[in-house]
Image: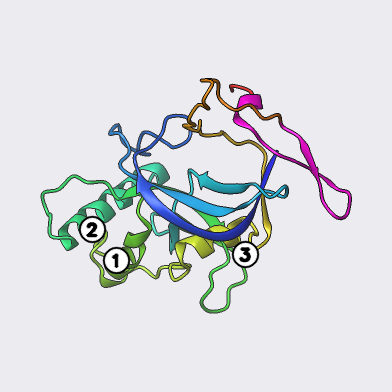
Amino acid sequence: MFSVRIVTADYYMGSPLPGLDPCQAHFREAPAGRVPVVRVFGATPAGQKTCLHLHGIFPYLYVPYDGFGQHPEHYLRKVAFSIDRALNVALGNPSSTVQHVFKVSLVSGMPFYGYHEKERQFMKIYLYNPAMVKRVCELLQGGAIMNKSYQPHEAHIPYLLQLFIDYNLYGMNLINLAAVKFRKARRKSDISGASKHHRIHFAENSNSTSFIEWDEDEIPRH
């Protein structure tokens, strides 16, 4: 439905938006805290300058699963609570109830270190803040979580690069989206008091390929 050429990208932490972000933390009844939003700056194939906001992209890392013999969901919940508590202590707020873990899920994969014939189970730990990944790795390796020492996997990959790898994206190429929502622009009216009206039209490039141009007045309300 919509394409943007990736010129540059960054992210910011913001309040969750209903319909775009999860508004409640996984495992818990509490509302979700601040969530990461990726911004992609570029242009559509027709040349319209665009700032694309990507929601629901959370940083993650893997650690080997060691909760055999226990109920998986109960054990994953304990790991999430342990990470939150250890991270709050490390940040100097031992009495804080701030939640840093979005969710923990159980996945299977081939271990990166050493030789292995079969896949193993891993805990995929999703965090809210990409800046906390390195600190969580230090706590996992140092035995501050669950009183064990864990070997993190894929924790060295920067947040934006992780996104690019997962969705097969790379710089100056198009990111294609099946559905988007447009932000309503605040445009000044012209002298007559009526706002300028432009139709969606197709621009012709040198190869006679048609590209759509978007205009707020012609975009369906939904």
Q: Which residue is the site of mark 3? A: 171
Residue 50: x, y in percent? Answer: 58, 47
Q: Is residue 69 visible?
A: no
Residue type at numbered disc 1: Arg
Q: Earlier in the sequence, mark 3 or mark 2?
A: 2
Q: Earlier in the sequence, mark 1 or mark 2?
A: 2
Front residue of 79/169: it is: 169
Q: Which residue is the site of mark 1? A: 135
Mark 1 in CB contact with mark 2 (< 8 angstroms)? yes
Front residue of 197/97: it is: 197
The quadrant of the rendering that contains the C terminus is top right
Q: Nearer the viewer, mark 1 or mark 3?
A: 3
Q: In terms of image quadrants, where is residue 200?
A: top right
| Residue 134 in the image: above or below residue 168 | below
Front residue of 207/95: it is: 207
Residue 94: x, y in percent? Answer: 12, 54
| Residue 102 in the image: above or below residue 222 | below
Q: Within 10 Å of the Cα at label 1, are there few (<14), some (14-19), or many (20+) other Cα atoms?
A: few
C-alpha span from label 1 to label 3: 28 Å
